[in-house]
Image (cartoon, rainbow, N blue to C red):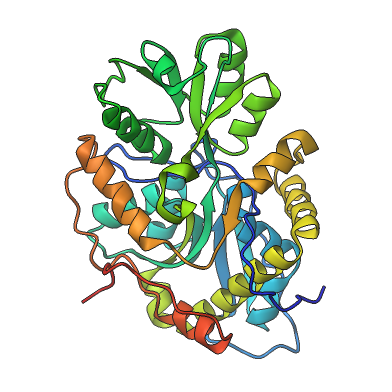
Amino acid sequence: MPAPRSTGKTLRRGLAAAAALPLLVGLLASCGYGSQAQKDEPKATGASAGGRKLSASEVRIGYFPNLTHATALVGLQEGLIARELGATAIKPQTFNAGPSEIEALNGGSLDIGFIGPSPSINGYVKAKGSNLRIISGSASGGVKLVVNPEKIKTPDDLKGKRIATPQKGNTQDVAFLNWISEKGWTVDPESGKGDVSVVRTDNKVTPDAFKQGSIDGAWVPEPTASKLVSDGGTVLLDETSLWPDKKFVITNVIVSRKFLKEHPDVVEAVLRGTVRTNEWINANPAQAKASANARLKADSGKELDAKILDPAWQSILVTDDPLASTLKTESEWAVKAKLLEKPDLTGIYDLTLLNKVLKAAGKPEVSDAGLAAE
């Protein structure tokens, strides 16, 4: 399917699911809905017999079957990434959580991955920067505070209530703890006890807990947020409202340092594919939404119901920009919450190839917020 040229607009379209953020070097964890990689043996796809030859015969790409990984879902479904790779085959692999994806990258079974900022930071810090680089953005937004409207009508009503986050130290947990502290309330970051009870609950369990009344609300990513709304919840706060320009990273693209060094031409081709995919998503939102849902069904056996898919899709912005300054802020929030010792993130970004691709496409270059290697 041809990919139309961008109109230059950036539409907030997207998809959702979990993604994650600053984290404690031993604690910070996952983005996604589980803890294990999918067990199905991935099959190489997309190679063109007549395509140009690059330095690797295949590239192993990891992602979550979640809407926040729209670039991967649509790029693979529509063949937009494969087209740029020519004779190099894609070997896709799906994951349910960031730590398992980082483990695969560290173990040499994964080359490039779509992943949240928290596992990116955690993986980088634990390996002292030897294992990965963030090479592109992918998605922004898609996180909401959804509450029981019978119990909570204003932000001040949260005091004394039980509010779920996906996991201690994950992206949403850190953001919620920071929001609580700015309200002047106190919560112990380890136990979650305090003026607000922060209940760390897996996203798969949160909707049932909400319906049963064991939690009064949740600070969660899409599509969990839209699921809670469909079950009677009300959006009290959209996290985008807390950020300058209403943008913050929820998914970025990482690469194994070894693969980047040995196969920069393949990495560049993948980035041409992701840039082209994001352009196509923004130009064809309805068609892209259907494409993402089709890929979800192929990967997980289930597609999302329209009442969940539609609002979730609306809340995510796909973007090439890694929004590096927001990752820096998120790590500072984790330090402030005492869930992370102050990390040295210098060198976590290498946007050289992305900016080369953007320049060739007539698009503005993006910033690493001073976090590139010196």
Residue at point 38% right, 49% down?
119
The reply to whether residue 83 is in sight is yes
Foreground residue among 112 and 108: 112
Res 259 → quadrant: bottom left
* Residue 127 in the figure: left or right of residue 306: left
Q: Is residue 346 above or below residue 127?
A: below
- Give coordinates of residue 56: x percent, y percent: 54, 81
* Residue 226 in the figure: left or right of residue 117: right
Residue at point 25% right, 54% down?
125
Foreground residue among 284 and 263: 284
* Residue 324 in the figure: left or right of residue 53: left
Quarter containing the N terminus:
bottom right
- Give coordinates of residue 277: x percent, y percent: 66, 69
The reply to whether residue 263 is in sight is no
Residue at point 67% right, 19% down?
232
Residue at point 58% right, 42% down?
17
Res 89 → quadrant: bottom right
- Give coordinates of residue 317: x percent, y percent: 58, 55
* Residue 66 in the figure: left or right of residue 336: right
